[in-house]
């Protein structure tokens, strides 16, 4: 990972229970979360779903960004396959043990 990924501050949700974002349908993320060309994520498409979760987790500026765009059960299911900077994964797993490696094996 880059030095930027190591030094960058990452946002965490207040509580995984507050992740009440959409679990189905389509989503267009706000510009501050997805600053590329406008894209509509189809949450029924596994590749779109994973990509959206990776972007939201990496780019969230406030806990509200996470609460509004991520869904707890979906995050728990996807967590092992998300491609995230090592630092962000460690931060999330330190705060939320249910995301740790032992949880993935269960």
Image (tube, helix red, strand yellow):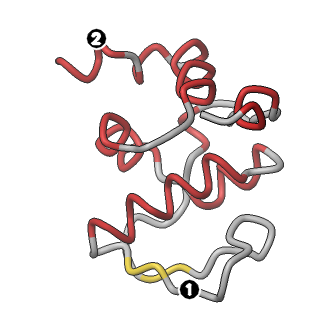
Which part of the image, by quadrant, shows the C terminus?
top left
Marks 1 and 2, Cα distance to the nearest angstrom? 35 Å
Work out whether 14 lies above or below 57.
Answer: above
Q: Residue at x 32, y 15 (%)?
A: 101
Residue at x 61% of width, y 42% of height = 18
Taking the image as shown, residue 57 lies to the left or right of residue 41, namely: right
**Disc 1: which residue:** 39
Q: Residue furthest front?
A: 2
The quarter of the picture where residue 77 lies is top left
Q: Residue 59: x and y, percent? A: 71, 53
Give the side of residue 5 with respect to residue 71, left or right: right
- Under circle 1, the secondary element is loop
Tell me where residue 33 sits by quadrant: bottom right
The residue positioned 38% from the left and 65% from the top of the image is 49
- The residue carrying mark 2 is 102
Q: Is residue 2 left or right of residue 9?
A: left
State the image coordinates of residue 69 (x, y, percent, origin top left): 59, 60
Circle 2 Cα neighbour tier, 10 Å, few/some/many (<14 / 14–19 / ≥20): few
Residue 60, x across and y down, in percent: 73, 51
The residue carrying pointer 1 sits among few (fewer than 14), some (14 to 19) or many (20 or more) residues within 10 Å by Cα, namely few
Q: Quadrant of residue 88?
A: top right
Query: SS at mark 2?
Result: helix
> In this image, 36 relative to 46: left or right?
right
Q: Residue at x 45, y 62 (%)?
A: 51
Residue 38: give x, y in percent of width and height.
64, 88
Q: Compare marks 1 and 2 and give the one earlier in the sequence.
A: 1
- Which quadrant holds the N terminus? top right
């Amino acid at each position: 990972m880059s030095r930027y990924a190591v030094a960058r501050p990452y946002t965490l949700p207040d509580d995984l229970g507050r992740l009440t974002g959409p679990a189905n349908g389509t989503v267009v993320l706000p510009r501050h979360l997805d600053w590329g060309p406008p894209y509509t994520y189809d949450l029924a498409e596994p590749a779109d779903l994973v990509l959206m979760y990776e972007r939201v987790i990496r780019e969230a500026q406030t806990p509200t960004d996470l609460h509004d765009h991520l869904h707890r059960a979906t995050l728990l299911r996807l967590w092992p396959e998300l491609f995230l900077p090592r630092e962000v994964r460690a931060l999330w797993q330190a705060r939320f043990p249910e995301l740790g490696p032992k949880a993935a094996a269960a």
